């Protein structure tokens, strides 16, 4: 399982190609060998391919525009292939995950997921806490997504922090989704002055030794560090703290 940096953490510093290129170099200097591209400026896929190669990085996953993925899955996959990635990620549903929106999402993205699969790609869905909402029939939104798409059509980028906020157990869900979580989002949860905070891995209260062991047994290939909010800390320093902790646990 490789350690990767989720570039949404660095989005404010990737508003231009120059800034984006600098951040690719900086995460490689920390020691990361993989990245997820999300929340950055517009870029040419061939340019990204060169920048990744220059820094010894591979793109494990993206978060792409949800409308473009639905409307032109083949075109999106062709762009991904230029920079060596076949995992097309979306960060959430086009509208927040409610019961009604979930049925609409399944209807709109079933064909898209099938087309990506048939052409050697795969769609990946990233959860927040709302996917753990119970629907009117008592079933979780997350369970409806699992049932609506086959494992080879839809993978899940399980987010440790949001699973915890949703009142669920990450390890239970890794076991439940075995083989479908090729990429996991790692962010810790800490309590600071009675407030819930996102934190570098190892700085909060989540049991990452257990989580990582379960992820490995469940087939996870990339452990992607993400910290949406850094509360005044340098996001690069937060990424380094997480990397150093994960490396101390034996990851590379």
Image: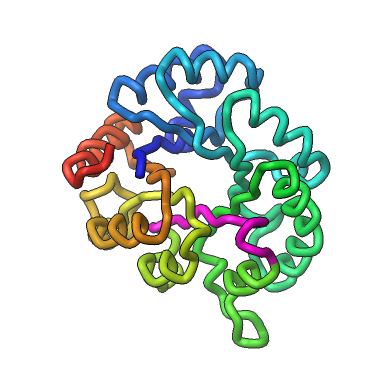
Q: Residue visible at 66% across and 69% down? A: 98
Residue furthest to the bottom in view is: 137
110 displayed left or right of 163 = right
Identify the image quadrant of residue 63: top right
Picture layout, residue 116 above or below residue 172: above
Picture layout, residue 166 above or below residue 53: below
Is 119 in front, or is 8? Answer: 119
Q: Position of residue 198 (x, y in %)?
A: 35, 51
169 displayed left or right of 194 = right
Coloration mode: rainbow
> What's drawn in magenta, residue-wise?
149-160
Residue furthest to the left in view is: 248
Q: Residue visible at 45% across and 13% down? A: 54
Q: Residue visible at 41% across and 73% down? A: 167
Q: Residue visible at 42% across and 32% down? A: 34
Instruction: Determine if the magenta segment contains residue 158.
Output: yes
Q: Position of residue 101 (x, y in %)?
A: 73, 65
Picture layout, residue 225 above or below residue 79: below
How many numbered marks are there? 0
Look at the image and tell me whether residue 62 can be seen.
yes
In the picture, which quadrant includes the C terminus?
top left
Look at the image and tell me whether residue 195 can be seen.
no
129 displayed left or right of 105 = left
3 displayed left or right of 185 = left
Instruction: Determine if the magenta segment contains residue 116.
Output: no
In the picture, which quadrant includes the N terminus?
top left
Q: Position of residue 55 (x, y in %)?
A: 41, 17
Q: Position of residue 179 (x, y in %)?
A: 49, 59
């Amino acid at each position: 399982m490789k350690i990767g940096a989720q570039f949404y953490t660095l989005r404010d510093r990737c508003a231009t190609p120059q800034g984006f290129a600098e951040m690719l170099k900086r995460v490689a200097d920390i020691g990361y060998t993989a990245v997820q591209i999300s929340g950055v400026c517009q870029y040419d896929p061939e340019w990204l391919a060169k920048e990744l190669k220059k820094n010894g990085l591979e793109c494990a996953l993206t978060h792409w525009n949800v409308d473009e993925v639905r409307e032109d899955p083949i075109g999106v996959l062709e762009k991904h292939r230029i920079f060596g990635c076949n995992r097309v990620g979306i960060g959430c549903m086009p509208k927040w995950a409610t019961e009604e929106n979930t049925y609409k999402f399944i209807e709109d993205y079933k064909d898209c997921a099938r087309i990506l699969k048939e052409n050697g790609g795969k769609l990946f869905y990233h959860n927040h806490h709302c996917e753990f909402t119970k629907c009117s029939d008592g079933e979780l939104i997350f369970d409806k997504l699992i049932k609506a798409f086959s494992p080879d059509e839809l993978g899940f980028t399980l987010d440790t922090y949001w699973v915890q906020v949703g009142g669920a157990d990450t390890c239970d869900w890794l076991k439940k989704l075995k083989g479908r979580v090729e990429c996991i989002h790692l962010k810790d949860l800490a309590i600071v002055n009675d407030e819930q905070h996102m934190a570098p891995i190892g700085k909060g209260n989540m049991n990452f030794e257990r989580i990582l062991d379960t992820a490995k047994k469940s087939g996870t290939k990339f452990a992607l560090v993400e910290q949406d909010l850094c509360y005044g800390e340098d996001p690069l320093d937060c990424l380094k703290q997480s990397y150093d902790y994960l490396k101390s646990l034996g990851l590379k």
